[in-house]
Image (tube, helix red, strand yellow):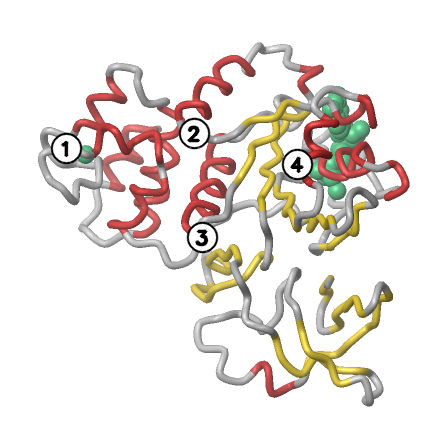
Amino acid sequence: MRQDAKVCHVEVDGKVRLCAIRGRLFENLGDRKGPIAVGDHVMIDPTGDPQSIESVIPRRNYLSRVASSHDPREQILLSNVDHMYVIASIASPGFSSNRTDRILAACRQRDIPATLIFNKVDIDKKGVLSDLRDTYALAGVPLLETCAIEGYDGPGMESLRQSLMNKVSGFYGASGVGKSTLLNAIDPSLNIKVGKISKYWTAGKHTTTYSQMHALPIGEDSWVIDTPGIRVFRPFGLTRETLRDLFPDFSAYQKKCRFPNCTHDHEPECEVFEALESGLIAPTRYGSYVEMLDEIGGTQSHADEDEDEES
Ligand SMILES: Nc1nc2c(ncn2[C@@H]2O[C@H](COP(=O)(O)OP(=O)(O)O)[C@@H](O)[C@H]2O)c(=O)[nH]1
Ligand SMILES: [Mg+2]
Ligand SMILES: [Zn+2]
């Protein structure tokens, strides 16, 4: 199912139908922003014109974020996936630890297994790849390295194809990292539009503005949901207490913090902080954690102090 504005593309027996969403589904949303997400399984009333979505079958899982900094409601990015692929490029656009760590935390929050794909390994001019491998190995994240412009037979492609087989997968990554190129390399018959890198912004142009589900012509039942590049993913429903468990690279150390509910932010005798100082935890990972912790708020924050230190 793909969604733009109020029209949904629903697949029924291999054919796509355009459906409206029954008005009733917008009632009683509570703190949810909308009733439907890409990946949903729905019941439709085929008698209407347009046909309409009557109900959403309960989701087996989903990823959601805070809609925006002005809108605290929950926005569902996608639903009913077996696996997430977080796609990042090594250069153009440069690797963003913050973006990557946020979505990895969101996947962990919802128990959705995630693989990190380093794409554009052909242009690792700054030699950042080796450090990134170490950082994410410590975080227990499975890694795959690809060069999507090499196409079907490029590095990593066969193992990517194998792992996509007979699953519903989600692709997430900044605009321009090569998601569409990667999909075309998986199977050239998909023929998805690839963006040009803008010279001014060294970021990709927005060729994808909505999430879309593609049937992959591999295996029996293989699907990929390609999501648009979201700038800031603030996982919905996090608390100061739950955030720390979304960083598995902290877990061996945080057991030994003096306070069992240590947030590793300001507390004395914090073993996570010690591990950071000794180089056992990557500063980028700790940085992402602290930024997310500050967003949650809660204690009268050390956020202001932290910001002062940064600048
Ligand atoms: N050098 C290099 N460029 C790539 C690679 N993969 C994609 N690109 C280029 O990056 C740009 C953006 O790709 P696109 O697939 O549209 O990114 P998307 O926005 O994530 O879907 C295009 O110009 C691609 O040709 C790669 O592995 N190496
Ligand atoms: Mg794209
Ligand atoms: Zn601590």
- Of discs 2 and 4, which sits in the foreground? 4
Q: Quadrant of the N terminus?
A: bottom right
Q: Is 198 in front, or is 125?
A: 125
- Of discs 1 and 2, which sits in the foreground? 2
- Of discs 3 and 1, which sits in the foreground? 3
Q: Earlier in the sequence, mark 4 or mark 1?
A: 4
Residue 219 appears anywhere in the view: yes
x then y, percent, for residue 82? 58, 49
Determine crowd level at label 1: few under 14, some 14-19, many 20+ residues with C-alpha closer than 10 A. some
Q: Amino acid at mark 3?
A: Arg
Residue 112 horizontal side relative to residue 221, left or right: left
Task: Kindly identify which residue carries mark 2.
Answer: 140
Q: Is mark 3 in CB contact (under 8 Å) with mark 4?
A: no
Q: Quadrant of the C terminus?
A: top left
Q: Earlier in the sequence, mark 3 or mark 1?
A: 3
Q: Amino acid at mark 1?
A: Cys
Residue 14 horizontal side relative to residue 83, left or right: right
Task: Kindly identify which residue carries mark 1.
Answer: 257
Mark 3 to mark 2: distance in Å? 16 Å
Q: Is 92 in front, or is 34?
A: 34
Mark 3 to mark 4: distance in Å? 20 Å
Q: Is mark 2 in CB contact (under 8 Å) with mark 4?
A: no
Task: Kindly identify which residue carries mark 4.
Answer: 163
Task: Kindly identify which residue carries mark 3.
Answer: 110
Asked if residue 16 is positioned above or below residue 216 in the image, the reply reads below
Determine crowd level at label 4: few under 14, some 14-19, many 20+ residues with C-alpha closer than 10 A. few
Q: Is mark 3 in CB contact (under 8 Å) with mark 2?
A: no
Q: Earlier in the sequence, mark 3 or mark 4?
A: 3
Asked if residue 198 is positioned above or below residue 102 in the image, the reply reads above
Q: Amino acid at mark 4?
A: Ser
